[in-house]
Amino acid sequence: MVSKLIFVVLLSSFLFTVNGLYEDQAGKFDWKQNYVGEVKFSSIDVDVTTKRLYVATEKNVVASLAIDTGDIIWRQILEKGPEGSVELIHPTKSRIITVSGVDVIKVRGWDVKDGYLHFEWSTETSNVLYLFVFNGLLHNVYSSNNLIAVDTYHLETGVKGKATYTFPSHWFSGSDRCALSSGSLACLDVAGKLNIGLLIKSNTDRLSLDMIGDKIKAIPGSPIPAFIVTIKNVEKLIYVKENKILVRSLTTRSSSFIYTYMADRHILLQISSPMQDTIVTEGSILEDSTVIESLSLKESKSSLKISNPRISSAFCGRSKANTVNCVALVTTQDQSLMLLKMPGTIKWHREESLTNIINVEFVDLPVSDIEAAIEKEFGNKESFLDHSVSTGAFSMFVRRLLSQLQQLRTLFATVLGIIESPSETTGTKSNLVRDQFGLHKIIVTVTSAGKIFGIDNLNGEILWSVLLCGVGTFYENKVNGLPSAPMYLQRNSKHLSYSPMCTLLLKSEDSENTVLFTFNPINGESKNGVTQVPYRVIQAVPLPVLNIESVRSLILFDSSNSPHLYPADTPLSSKPPPLYIYIANPTNGLLQGFTVNVPISGKELSTKEVWKTQFNKPTQIIAIGSRDAMEHVHSQGRVLSDRSVLYKYINPNMVAILTLAPDTTHKSVLTLHLLDAVSGIIIYSVVHKRASHPIHLVHSENWLLCSYYNDKTRRTEIASYELYDGNQLSNSSDFSSVGGSLIPPIVEKQAYILPGFLQAMKPTITEKGITSKHILMATTTGHLLEVPWAFLDPRRPLGEPKEEGAIPYIPELPMPSESMINYNKSLMRVDGIYTTPSSLESTCLVFVYGLDLFYTRVAPSKTFDVLKEDFDYLVIIIVTTILLISAYVTKNLASQKALKQAWK
Amino acid sequence: MICDSYKVCIVLLSIVLVSLPNANGQSESNRELYDIEGTVMLPNLTTSWLAETVIQLKGGEAVGFLRKNGSFLISKVPSGSYIVEVVNPNYVYEPIRVEINSKGKYRARKVNYIQSSHVHQMPYPLEFVNYMPAKYFYTREQWKVTDFLFNSMVLTMVLPLLAILVLPKLMNDPETKKEMEQLTNLKHDMPEMSEMITSFFTGNTPTAEKQKEKTKAIKSSKKSNKNN
């Protein structure tokens, strides 16, 4: 028994040497960017020595940023979801106090310098309308029994104040017609009056003003009660001073902010952005509308893309030259955060929308100009279909001379150290070219703020960004309620005479119809890229063949199940085989399979329904797992100990469908169906009782992994399934879903315990599929774990191992710290992991997104195809030179000896 | 018999019926919320340390933060069984399972995922005492002379080389030469196999011994003759 255990330990330790890092590799090919999320509340530290600002964000993060650079000094992540949503921040001299939560209000005081907790108290409430701080007391405004009640708590201790003020509820005319600013509640009533009442004492006198408004909103962070009332698209600023309501008309549509300048004077700062690259600020004295010249400026910067700027907080001071200077923290609609110095410029800029990535794609870079010339010269027709290369002897000779001339020129340029000007043709930086191993790519990300980014994968630098405002919005994913943005790479950068092309499916801003946005993923440019279609696309499938312009056309399925081709009216290069498409509707549980016939002309597509499956109401489809389209399976079978082969069941048409249904005895039942999307046959089904969220599904090669939380045993379990054909290969050439035998595959299954909680799970992928597979798991403790699939293999033997290399079954999965590939760069709130192959078979590129961005590359079977980076070049040089020298010396010596012997 | 089984059925049904409202009642009383308290032993008490350590309940459903003395509070959680983990980027702590029953009784125990019924009680308020630095990196193998020398390949190469180079040198020494000669002599003293066997089969061993001595003498004389 002991020996067996030792064997297991040895084996696992041996296997785990496969992955992991050496200390000097840290940060060599990985990077991490920390973010805070869209800023909700902020406060600039008045103390000039510390130079900090504090933010609370939509991602439930409280953080301190450096005013000069925008770098994060400390960051604390509160509870996920509404339980941790920050409702209020209140800075005091040494603490920053946050109030968070909905039904349970948690008040926490953080140290301003280091961000640790000073105090925490909590209270249970319900029907909270507003929360505000006045005089060191937290006021909780809530509705109860037809009254508006205000409870007070001491902010630092949580001791409840003596009095509860109540106000008649007819004051409150609905949350969209009321606003609270600086302790005063302003409501527009039905009679066309604006009533403003103070909620900090139990008096009932109110100020009122005749005003018919459509909307009212408070100016955030205002020191005096100040509101903006919209009346038929005209905005009016209303503020209370010395118990009087004063009204000031606003001329431009802009965002306002009020700052106490002197005891009785306030500065009104206004900011607007008439165009994407300009930002206009105006400053004036609130009371007498005197314009402050030093605060009024117009700034243009072509690299910026601004929409709807809003001042979150500001700090003003008087300079030596007796002018007013301000710094303002500005947030925009696309969730970026910037510090504006007035008079002056934008000091720094943070793209916080990168915390809300909803879709990722890695795009290969185009080849360099020289390589393009070489490719043109030889005219590799297979990969560069689009070249009309003439084959005349003379023209080929000229081409050869020209390309060699160019090579010579670049050689001189590099030798002399002349930095190349950006390539004229592609308009990109000269270093943005494909490298030998395909490790340099562009990460194209779509964020829910409506901004697309192109990020350099080697250093994380943002290369370009595009705002989708005015183009379209996103459809909502019915399963998780998040916005969805399907993105398709229609043309990669291999086609030299065409630029790469990426298409994003968006929802039209004023109807349910779809808008297709086509752009170049290398530089983000879009030339007539917006296509409005008169229908709503419910499924889009790329064709297996290219059209004559080397574009992988998309079949768009509209809501009446009729297919369309995009781009339309371009003939295809060859006739595609009959296509099978499935559509899953999570709202009504309907699954349908269609066959589509696409003629070579690309016109008059025809479709026919093949099968239909319905999941009835309480059962809900929660996930569909299909294999990565790029994936290759290298080995067709598995050699057993008796030298026979167990063939894998590799069905390219198989999809896994996860459904969750509530159950009276088992709480909730998770069902996994394996469905053939061509024939509609359910190949296999399995049920997990008492399984609940978080649920993750991975489908790759001939195996599936499904992780869930088991409510009965209270642990995370990963169920592993593997499908085999048996000892005979049922399909020697191509898999057929309709022909062939209907013998169901052999399903091997096993469950493992994961000692932790999963945030995301993804298998690695390599170009040819020769490299063994590892599973990347992001845990809630912030680690990115690389687990070899061999540990999750359902064929791990229960008893003595029979097969070579098989690890005996142990229920608990090991989580050694060496396999945490992000080492101490913790990744909290991971939304997803993206993996893509590089041109090296051994290497897989990994991008993890969520609150932070993390990029690394992994080599599941070690880098067998390149020299290790710790390869000792010096030793090999020394050894070969010594050998060469010694060979010559001994040769001479031997000849001398031979001569001497001859003389004897 | 049938009647009996009916009775059983009815009894069972009634139990179910009785237990159902109970279950409902329980879910309502679940609204009672509890606080979980504890302390974390820190490797050093710098304040940046406190800020980067978070206490997670059931994978982040609720979180607690450390105060200056290393204590934490996870406030307002419903009764149930939770795993409490200390999350720090550089150190690893052992998680503890906390169970709060519907009456508000606390029990802390060691986490055992495989045998969940096995209880190993731990003190409450929680104490996270055992920590160890997380080892994320492998140490690179460094080139050492001893490693090279004691490599089996090197040994098999070097030892015969030594034997080839050193042994002839030793031969030059006159004394060793003598010894060597003696050794060779001894070798010749060995009895011949065929003779031994014949003597063995003939039976008279004492004579055979004598014979041996004789042959030895003859042989040596022969040899010396030859050498001469």
Image (cartoon, rainbow, N blue to C red):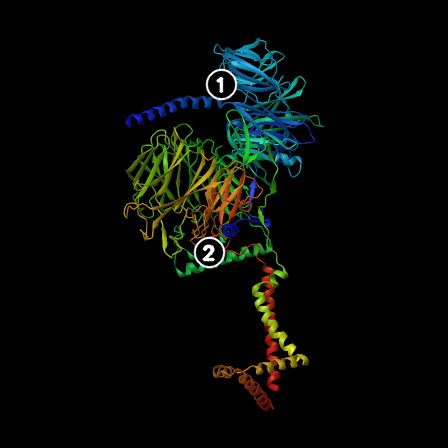
Amino acid marked by disc 1: Asp
| Front disc: 1 or 2 | 1
Q: Residue at the location (54% across, 85% down)?
A: B207
Element at badge 2? helix
Q: Residue at the location (62% across, 83% down)?
A: A900
- Structural crowding at the residue carrying mark 1, measured as other residues with C-alpha within 10 Å and reported as few (<14), some (14–19) or many (≥20): few
Q: Is residue A740 left or right of residue A833?
A: left
| Residue A688 visible somewhere in the drawing | yes
Considering only vertical position in the picture, is B189 above or below A804?
below
Q: CA distance from mark 1 to mark 2?
A: 65 Å
Are callouts 1 and 2 both on one chain?
Answer: yes
Amino acid marked by disc 2: Ile
- Structural crowding at the residue carrying mark 2, measured as other residues with C-alpha within 10 Å and reported as few (<14), some (14–19) or many (≥20): some
Q: Which numbered marker is on residue A761?
A: none
The chain to which mark 1 is attached is A
Considering only vertical position in the picture, is A192 above or below A41?
above
Residue B120 location (% of width, % of height):
54, 36
Quarter residue B36 falls in: top right
Q: Nearer the viewer, residue A638 or A869?
A: A638
From this viewpoint, which residue is outermost toward the right? A320
Considering only vertical position in the picture, is A772 above or below A147?
below
Q: Which residue matches tag 1?
A: A176
Q: Which residue matches tag 2?
A: A374
The chain to which mark 2 is attached is A
Disc 1 + disc 2, Cβ < 8 Å? no
Q: Is residue A559 left or right of residue A306?
A: left
Q: Nearer the viewer, residue A854 or B162?
A: B162
Residue B82 location (% of width, % of height):
52, 32
For marks 1 and 2 on the same chain, the one whose residue lies earlier in the sequence? 1
| Residue A604 visible somewhere in the drawing | no
Q: Give the mark count.
A: 2
